Amino acid sequence: MNFRYLITVSLLFVLTAATLHGQSRRRRPVVPATLHIEDLPQQPLDTLATDDPETRIIIFSNNTWRYYRPALKVRDSLPVYMQYWDTSQVFAYKSIAYEDLPSVVDLNLVKDLSGFKAPVVGSVLSKYGPRGRRNHNGVDIPLKIGEPIYAAFDGKIRYAKYNTGGFGNLVIVRHENGLETWHAHLSKLNVKVNDYVKCGQVIGFCGSTGRSRGPHLHFEMRYCDQTFDPEFIVDFQTGQLKYQTFALEKQFFNIHSRASEILEEDDDDFPLLASAEGDTASGDILERIAAAQKKEEQQTKTATVSSSNAVYHTIKQGDILGRLALKYGVSVSQICRLNNITPKTVLKLGRRLRIK
């Protein structure tokens, strides 16, 4: 009897020990062979400011960090950076005709002066406007090879590559107000398409690539592909912005802005600005600029002799095109043609119309 009791107790002890051992093995945590810092729990602890006010750094509990740019998500959803966004062609608004543009566009350029930096500062060698039988769609500013070119306003790069139509290395920046700034003949690009740039950021360097006889910046301003004189907005001699908000009138546009994708420059009419190394003396450059500008002024005077007897009318309350045509003995179509308007254009008080 005692013997059987001892056997039973012994078996129970062995079975209990085996069970406890098995449970102990099942409860033991499995430790991975290699523990990575990314596998640790990640909780945000703090944020740090950076030199860019729109970029912050998030610090996590596992000693990791990453950049946080909430403003970029907002910008990506803006229609101006989604619609008519073509990164392979210079003209992005081919489906919008000149006739469909509003008579006036209010361009909000900056909130304060910190939102602008002149792309370059210097004397304008060749101004915007007619050049022989063609139109010069921008301004030319002589520089030395390698001088930095800056983004005038915050924006996004729509086009950045070598252009075979004469622009050479070309950077096109689209800004939130729909304005585009074009920078041609660059020696080197410092951005790529879809990059966001800040005012004053270097987007490239002066060069003489493409159709160019010397190092200079060919700079254009366009709205819906239509060009207008950049000197309406920027004083390149001082590097100052002239307006905080600019009323861009349709009559300022050159109706032949999209006549060709080839750069409309006749460089044979203008002096070589500098050698490829940019070693021409500054005084020599200024003399060449003065001579070229004098020649251009003479050409402009010759081109405008036929309009010396032009008749203008300043719009007053109650004026309409039909009444003006009867008053001056001309047709409505003539007034429209001389002012690049249509019979449906709203005439703003104080606007000066050419009648003859």
Image: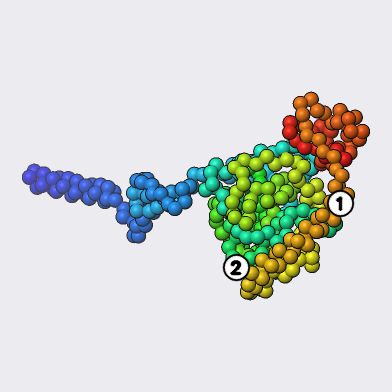
> Visible in this render: residue 124?
yes
In the image, taking residue 11 as reference, residue 33 lies left or right, namely right
> Looking at the rendered structure, which numbered label has been put on residue 44?
none
**Image height check: is 99 above or below 283?**
above
Instruction: Name the residue that disc number 1 marks.
Output: 305
Q: Residue at left 60%, top 68%? A: 146
Considering every residue shown, the one lying at the far top of the view is 318
In the image, taking residue 168 as reference, residue 200 lies left or right, namely left
**In terms of depth relative to the viewer, which is nearer, 10 or 336?**
336
Quadrant of residue 195 within the rendered picture: bottom right
Residue 175, image x and y in percent?
Answer: 62, 47
Considering every residue shown, the one lying at the far front of the view is 309
The colour style of the image is rainbow
Instruction: Give the spatial CA distance, label 2 vs label 1.
Output: 41 Å
Instruction: Name the residue that disc number 2 marks.
Output: 146
Q: Amino acid at mark 1?
A: Val
**Image height check: is 50 above or below 99?**
below
Q: Quadrant of the N terminus?
A: top left
Residue 192, image x and y in percent?
Answer: 61, 58
